[in-house]
Image (cartoon, rainbow, N blue to C red):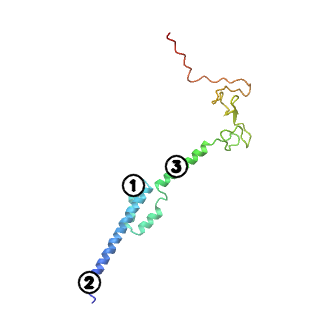
Amino acid sequence: MFDLDTALYYLTILVAVFAALFAALWLSLVIWTFRDMRRRTRDAFAQVLAALVVAALPVFGLVIYLILRPPETLAEAYERALEEEALLQEIEERPACPGCSRIVQTDWMVCPHCHTHLKNACIQCERPIELHWVVCPYCATPQLDNLTDEPVEAPASAYPEEAPAPSTS
């Protein structure tokens, strides 16, 4: 009824199946560790070292790797850097009042907090223009000097006007 040879045969098959499963699990953990480390760093030495630790110490190596691995992937670090850059650009693009350093709108003439004069109104079209502009960019009207109320002379253009072409008649 109970044969020792048959029991050893089945026991050998069972041990072989469990050994194959353990080897497949061990190999998959080594591969997973290498791929995970590749997503977290570009350092080839760190990638190989992490895989070797998991290969040399099957269970404990994985625990050590999980404790010591970098906290974020390269893709997550890239996305975080993009978010930080977008936030910095948003902060830099907003104009600030030179008097109180609070954020102001681009079309405000006066800071509502400290009453600092931010822009002038064009004498012709009344659109807001920068304080240092001598000509309105919207209607091309020369602006008045704040001290003398005379039109401000525009600086000489870097591009002289073209002379009319000689007639060939």
Q: Tell me where residue 100 appears, x and y as whole percent.
A: 70, 43
Looking at numbered disc 3 in the image, what kind of residue is underneath it? Leu
Question: Which mark is on residue 134?
Answer: none
Is 158 left or right of 57, judged from the image as shown?
right
Is 10 left or right of 145, judged from the image as shown?
left
Q: Residues within 10 Å of mark 3 (few under 14, many from 20)?
A: few
Disc 2 on helix, strand or loop? helix
Q: Residues within 10 Å of mark 2 (few under 14, many from 20)?
A: few
Residue at 49% x, 51% y: name it: 78
From the viewer's perspective, is residue 166 above or below residue 50?
above
Calculate the distance from the C-alpha at mark 3 to the C-alpha at mark 1.
25 Å
Q: Tell me where residue 62 appears, x and y as whole percent.
A: 42, 66
Looking at numbered disc 1 in the image, what kind of residue is underneath it? Ala
Q: Earlier in the sequence, mark 2 or mark 3?
A: 2
Q: Earlier in the sequence, mark 3 or mark 1?
A: 1
Question: Which mark is on residue 44?
Answer: 1
Which residue appears farthest toward the left when viewing the image? 5
Q: Quadrant of the N terminus?
A: bottom left
Q: Tell me where residue 87 appears, x and y as whole percent.
A: 58, 48
Residue at 39% x, 55% y: name it: 44
Q: Can you identify the residue that label 2 sits on?
A: 6
Q: Residues within 10 Å of mark 1 (few under 14, many from 20)?
A: few
Looking at numbered disc 2 in the image, what kind of residue is underneath it? Thr
Q: Can you identify the residue that label 3 sits on?
A: 82
From the viewer's perspective, is residue 78 above or below residue 101?
below
Disc 3 on helix, strand or loop? helix
Q: Quadrant of residue 124?
A: top right
Taking depth in this image into account, of 123 and 5 the one nearest to the observer is 123
